[in-house]
Image (tube, rainbow, N blue to C red):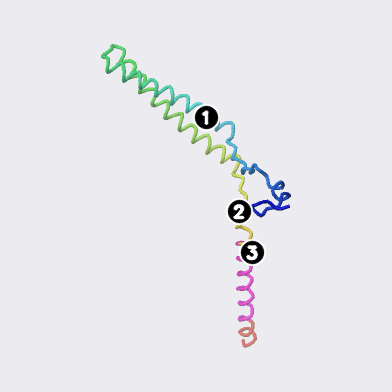
Amino acid sequence: MRSRSGVSAVAAVERSVWQEAPPRRVVPDSVRAASVRAVLVCAVTLVQAMVAFLFTVAGSWWAFPVVLSTVVSVVVTTWAVLDVWITRQVWVQRHGVRSQPSSVAEPVRAVRSHRAAGRRGAADDTAAPHRAAA
């Protein structure tokens, strides 16, 4: 039984509606925790900067202490973002990177080994007459 599109009903049933997505890379727990900390600290710093700006515009006496604490918060936020980067680097150094060759890697490796074998064979063929002559 064929449909209008020319695809049989059996083939249409065998095809899946859902496509399997490739697996996502998993972030290690230590890096995830550092990232969450950095995002929270950054959010607090942005709110604090907004409050400092509004206090300054309003001319409140709270403006000066809030601006000082905002400067301290910017330093802490910078430290938190650096902590994410350093934690990730340390994790990669301790645990290594799991690499998987791509689908192209195997044919390229085979071509290289075939070329290298061809060069070795050609070098052996040309070297033999010279040794016999000597």
Looking at the rendered structure, the kind of residue marked 1 is Ala
Q: What residue span does the magenta drawing correspond to?
A: 108-127
**Left or right of residue 70: residue 19:** right
Q: Which mark is residue 110?
A: 3
Q: Which mark is residue 102?
A: 2
Q: Main secondary structure of the magenta part?
A: helix
SS at circle 3:
helix
SS at circle 1:
helix
Around disc 3, counting alpha carbons within 10 Å, would you say few (fewer than 14), some (14 to 19), or many (20 or more)? few
**Left or right of residue 120: residue 69:** left
Query: At 73% from the left edge and 49% from the top edge, which residue is drawn?
Result: 10
Query: At 28% from the left edge and 17% from the top edge, which residue is drawn?
Result: 56
Point out the frontmost of discs 2 and 1: 2
Name the residue that disc number 1 marks.
Answer: 34
Q: Are marks 3 and 2 in contact (CB under 8 Å)?
A: no
Query: At 64% from the left edge and 42% from the top edge, which residue is drawn?
Result: 18
Around disc 1, counting alpha carbons within 10 Å, would you say few (fewer than 14), some (14 to 19), or many (20 or more)? some
Looking at the rendered structure, the kind of residue marked 2 is Ser
Of callouts 3 and 1, the N-terminal one = 1
